[in-house]
Amino acid sequence: MNDSTADPIERFFPPHPSFLYERIPVDLLCPNVETDTLLHLKLETKTAPEVFSANGEVEAEFEDGHLSLQIRTDTPVAVKPEGKPFLLIKPQKPGGSRPPSGAEIFTPVASEDGLQSEAITQAMRTLSSRGGGVLSVPPGVYPVSTIEMQSHVTLHLQKGAVLEATLDPDAYPVDPEGTLFEDLPNSLIPGPRRRVIYWYNCEYAALTGCGMITGQGSEYRRRTVGTPEGRPLINLMKFVKARQCRVEGVILADSEFWNTHVCLSQDIIFDSVAVINERPPREWAAYLGDHAKSWFWNNTDGINPDSSQRIVIRNCLLHTGDDCVAVKNTGTFRNELRDIEEIEVHHNLMICNTTPMKIGTETRGGTVASVHFHHNMIPFCSRMFAAELKDGITLKNLRVENITVADCNRPFDLEIIPRQDEIDQKLFSHVNGVTLRNIDIRRYRNEGQYWQSHIRGLDPAHTIKNVILSRIRLGAKDLNHLEDPDLVINEFTDGVELS
């Protein structure tokens, strides 16, 4: 076992007078870690902090403000000192910051607007035309708009390399007319038409290293929410019809909208990635005018698989203002809808204001099958899991297993519900086969208006069938019977079992 002292801690979303709401800071530490490393931290607290690990319990000792904990390269950790921001620890391999052998080193190119996105894209195009390769970006801050990933090319960000999204929304290429299907339900967010990293129709591409991509989303929202122009809705990353691609090790920070949207793609892996989005406080939009109330939330989801198959999200650190992982079927790219299959989300550390694990709400057609959330640690959330099906899919073989939640207000919802204010809605969902097993909610707040769990079908034609609830603990008690006041089941269900 090796010993390590702390690298510099980076603070995201610090308080600033230009923001009219009280920001919630979060700290990030990325130490170099061997297989097993003892990390020493000095904390400004006299009380032992809570420590959370994506792989279960972590060995920790605290004395006189000094915290020692044993960490591994593939295991993110969160530390919560009393009265202080979360400290997120993202271990990285010692050699991960060095350029891979044989990599081409990116050299900045002078441009009229100062952006390096076209130069990075062109360098990857050249490598792809030669059959592939690795483009490594050295330490430094590189202003960018949209970077287009290329087949058989790895974009490697060395430690200290930052791709910083420009604050000029007109610098981003906009999808051509017809890309965004216009006949969407009125209440369905139409989806952004801009992004920073674009994985369009590429295969065997990768984004790796220890660097960072930042979308400057909180500053975008500060400037645009409540204005006549409104928010630009920019993804930090978007995949469309990508295949056999990988994202590993990097930090994806401060997106303006959903951080990463995986659309119509297959065989995509996210491994040891940190998603650091802003978590706004309650009532953060109270300062906005009435015309801006519809945008009160920041919509900073983490990684959203959409009409995709065989997506894996593992060993990641997900800190988001909205849902951490939301599986959807939106049809926002030329109204193409595909069945969703084999989504696996496991051994992640998830912190969010809403729901870390979710199906929906956009579920516009087809089948969602074999989605598996398991072995995730959730230090804080509002609701652990939800399948909120507001459109028309068939959901089957869903498993949520071996989940630990330190603090939440509502355990889960499994519901078929209509879209608000939607007239003549014709498509509604069906559910057959859901398992929730080995769920441990340590602090179950059950506060305010929303605290009960729900299993609710819509009507006799749109029901929820064959649900297994097994070994679910809600704070100081176990869920032992279906008549528990913490659980609401309506008449449009069939085959709900509790063990």
Image: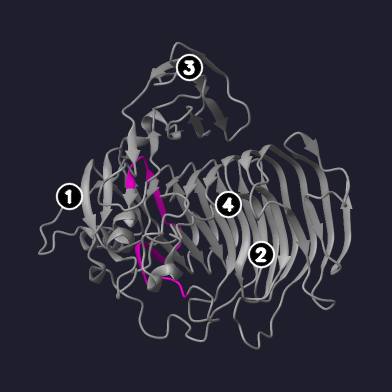
Marks 4 and 2, the one that precedes in the sequence: 4
Looking at the rendered structure, the kind of residue marked 2 is: Glu
Q: Magenta span covers which residues?
A: 190-212
Mark 4 vs mark 3, CA separation in Å: 31 Å
Mark 4 vs mark 2, CA separation in Å: 22 Å
Name the spot of residue 199 as percent of width and height, x first: 41, 63
Query: Pointer 4: what residue?
Result: 312
Residue at 51%, 27% in the rendered image: 72
Residue 408 picture quarter: top right
| Classed neighbour count for the residue bearing mark 3: other residues with Cα under 10 Å, few (<14), some (14–19), many (≥20) | some
| Classed neighbour count for the residue bearing mark 1: other residues with Cα under 10 Å, few (<14), some (14–19), many (≥20) | few
Name the spot of residue 427 as percent of width and height, x first: 69, 81
Mark 1 vs mark 2, CA separation in Å: 47 Å
Residue at the farthest top position: 64
Marks 3 and 1, the one that precedes in the sequence: 3
Looking at the rendered structure, the kind of residue marked 4 is: Val
Label 1: element kind: loop
Label 4: element kind: strand
Q: For the C terminus, which image quadrant?
A: top right
Label 2: element kind: strand
- Which of discs 4 and 3 lies nearer the camera? The answer is 3
The magenta stretch spans residue 281: no
Residue 11 picture quarter: top left
Label 3: element kind: strand
- Which of discs 3 and 1 lies nearer the camera? The answer is 3
Q: Is residue 478 left or right of residue 60?
A: right
Query: Pointer 1: what residue?
Result: 107
Q: Nearer the viewer, residue 142 or 280?
A: 280
Q: Nearer the viewer, residue 455 or 343?
A: 455
Q: Is residue 465 left or right of residue 422?
A: right
Looking at the rendered structure, the kind of residue marked 3 is: Ser
Query: Pointer 2: what residue?
Result: 388
